[in-house]
Image (spheres, grey):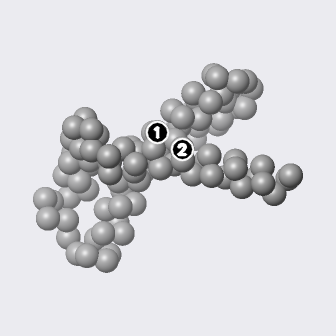
Amino acid sequence: MNEQLRRFWDFRRGATGVSRELLTLAACLGIGVVVMPCLIFAAGRIALGPYAHGSLFALWHDFIGGLLGGSQAEWFVALGPYLFVWLLRGARRLLHN
């Protein structure tokens, strides 16, 4: 798996323009759909106790259902990493000007 990530990162680094931005979006969306629900589950379990519907997979199932249902909250979580990349880009641009 680590080798695949390294190849993806090398491929993304060599890409330019729209293709690079689409690769960034795809990576961030993957993180938003897979990693973010896990982090939300862990934080909720620590702060609030067990998830009412069961395990991590139950939360992920509910999350995917919300995405498919068009829930704004779930889409915000899924696109959060990409929005964070945009914030970092803006901050870097402000600091370099």
Q: CA distance from mark 1 to mark 2?
A: 7 Å
Q: Are marks 1 and 2 in contact (CB under 8 Å)?
A: yes
- Tell me what residue is drawn at x 65 percent, y 27 percent: 20
Q: Name the residue at 39% across, 60% down.
A: 39
* Residue nearest the observer in this picture, 4 or 9: 9
Kind of residue indicated by mark 1 = Leu
* Number of other residues with Cα within 10 Å of mark 1, as a class: few under 14, some 14 to 19, many 20 or more: many
Query: Is 15 rendered above or below residue 78?
Result: above
Q: Is residue 19 left or right of residue 66?
A: right
**Residue at disc 1, secondary structure:** helix
Residue 64 seen in the figure: no
Q: Is residue 63 above or below residue 45?
A: above
- Name, please, the residue furthest toward the right: 97
What x and y, as percent, mark residue 47?
31, 77
In the rendered structure, which amino acid carries the disc numbered 2?
A: Tyr
96 displayed left or right of 3: right
User: Residue drawn at (36%, 56%), measured in percent from left and top?
Assistant: 38
**Would you name the residue on which mark 2 appears?**
82
Q: Nearer the viewer, residue 2 or 40?
A: 40
Tell which circle, 1 or 2, labels the residue nearer the N-terminal end: 1
Q: Residue at x 57, y 27 (%)?
A: 22
Q: Secondary structure at mark 2?
A: helix
Judged left or right of residue 97, residue 22 is left
| Relative to 37, 19 lies left or right | right
Q: Is residue 72 above or below residue 12?
A: below
**What mark, if any, has residue 62 been given in the picture?**
none
User: Which of the 4 image quarters holds residue 54?
Assistant: bottom left
- Of tags 1 and 2, the one toward the viewer is 2
Q: Visible in this render: residue 25?
A: yes
Q: Which residue is mark 1?
A: 29
